[in-house]
Image (spheres, helix red, strand yellow):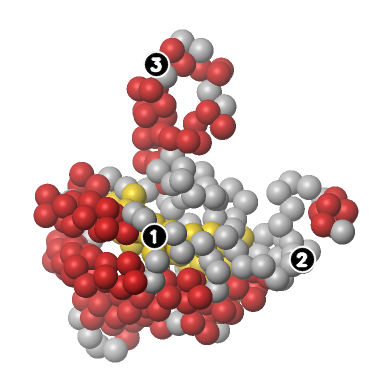
């Protein structure tokens, strides 16, 4: 059964869908191991769950979907598993782009893209170009991504663009730095879903998740389906998002 870990206890008003949902897709390997299958079978089945989630989010009016596909730490996994994941990434890009275009989905890949080989980088660029005109759903794939890397590269980009700030660091505010983050094109996530039973964010969107509602489920990612997504959304609809205010202030603002 899904397990939701909450950060506060009052309720959220309004039934509207979250604008931005982020997902840590965890449990592919365990799904396969429990079925006495090689881990690659779990990763392959996980692609089906990705496809289903993209379609379901589009139908439910969610405008941004961000998926944590491969972390900067995942390079530490066994070499054969990493190679398999890269092959699956290539296959998915080759097979799924047509469906993304058909469904009005724009795809971006963010992370340390230079870590990938030249052929995969070329496929990423091609998929991004082919879907650039779509606006029904903004899909972001975080690959070779880490939240600490994101903040560090944002500082580096900011100082390259505005080197005078190195002499006046007190002028660097959150608003000044934010446009240089990897997901600056998207609003901060309203809802984070993590499958697989773990209750941590694992270096994912450290800046962006500051006020995100966190939903954890014991379901392994290949088992995450439309019903599971709707359960997460129903939980989200029961939250009150205060952003540092009191419940009375929120009620007054929305009343």
Q: CA distance from mark 2 to mark 1?
A: 31 Å
Q: Position of residue 152 (x, y in %)?
A: 39, 34
Residue linked to disc 1: 134
Residue 163: image tag: 3
Mark count? 3
Q: Is the residue 192 above or below the residue 46 in the image? A: above
Give the secondary structure at mark 3: helix
- Identity of the residue drawn at 78% across and 47% down: 245
- The quadrant in which residue 150 appears is top left
| Quadrant where the N terminus is found in the figure | bottom right
**In the structure shown, which secondary structural element does the residue marked by tag 2 occupy?**
loop
Q: Residue 84: percent from the left, percent from the top?
A: 17, 68
Residue 157 sits above or below residue 213 on the image: above
Res. 141 in view: no
Position in image of residue 203 (x %, y %): 42, 51
Q: Earlier in the sequence, mark 3 or mark 2?
A: 2
Residue at (20%, 44%) from the top-left corner?
Answer: 114
- Left or right: 85 in relation to 188: left
Residue 13 numbered mark, or none: 2
Q: Earlier in the sequence, mark 3 or mark 1?
A: 1
Q: Residue at x 18, y 51 (%)?
A: 121
Q: Are marks 2 and 1 in contact (CB under 8 Å)?
A: no
Task: From the viewer's perspective, tell me whether residue 243 is left or right of residue 108.
Answer: right
Whether residue 10 can be seen here:
yes
């Amino acid at each position: 059964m899904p397990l939701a870990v909450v950060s506060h206890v009052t309720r959220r008003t309004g039934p509207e869908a979250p604008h931005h949902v982020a997902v840590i897709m965890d449990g592919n390997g365990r799904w396969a191991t429990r079925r006495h299958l090689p881990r690659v079978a779990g990763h392959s089945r996980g692609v089906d769950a990705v496809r289903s989630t993209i379609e379901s989010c589009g139908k439910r009016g969610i405008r941004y979907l961000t998926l944590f596909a491969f972390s900067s730490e995942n390079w530490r996994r066994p070499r054969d598993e990493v190679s398999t994941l890269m092959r699956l990434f290539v296959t998915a890009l080759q097979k799924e782009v047509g469906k993304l275009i058909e469904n009005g989905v724009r795809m971006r890949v963010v992370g340390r893209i230079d870590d990938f080989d030249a052929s995969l980088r070329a496929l990423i660029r091609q998929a991004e170009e082919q879907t650039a005109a779509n606006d029904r759903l903004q899909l972001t794939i975080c690959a070779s991504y880490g939240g600490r890397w994101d903040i560090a590269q944002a500082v580096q980009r900011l100082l390259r663009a505005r080197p005078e700030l190195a002499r006046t660091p007190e002028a660097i505010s959150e608003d000044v730095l934010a446009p240089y983050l990897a997901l600056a094109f998207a609003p901060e996530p309203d809802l984070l879903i993590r499958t697989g039973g773990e209750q941590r964010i694992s270096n994912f969107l450290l800046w962006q998740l500051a006020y995100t509602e966190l939903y954890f489920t014991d379901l392994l990612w290949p088992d995450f389906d439309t019903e599971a997504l709707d359960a997460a959304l129903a939980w989200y609809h029961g939250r009150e998002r205060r952003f540092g205010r009191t419940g009375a202030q929120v009620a007054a603002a929305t009343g």
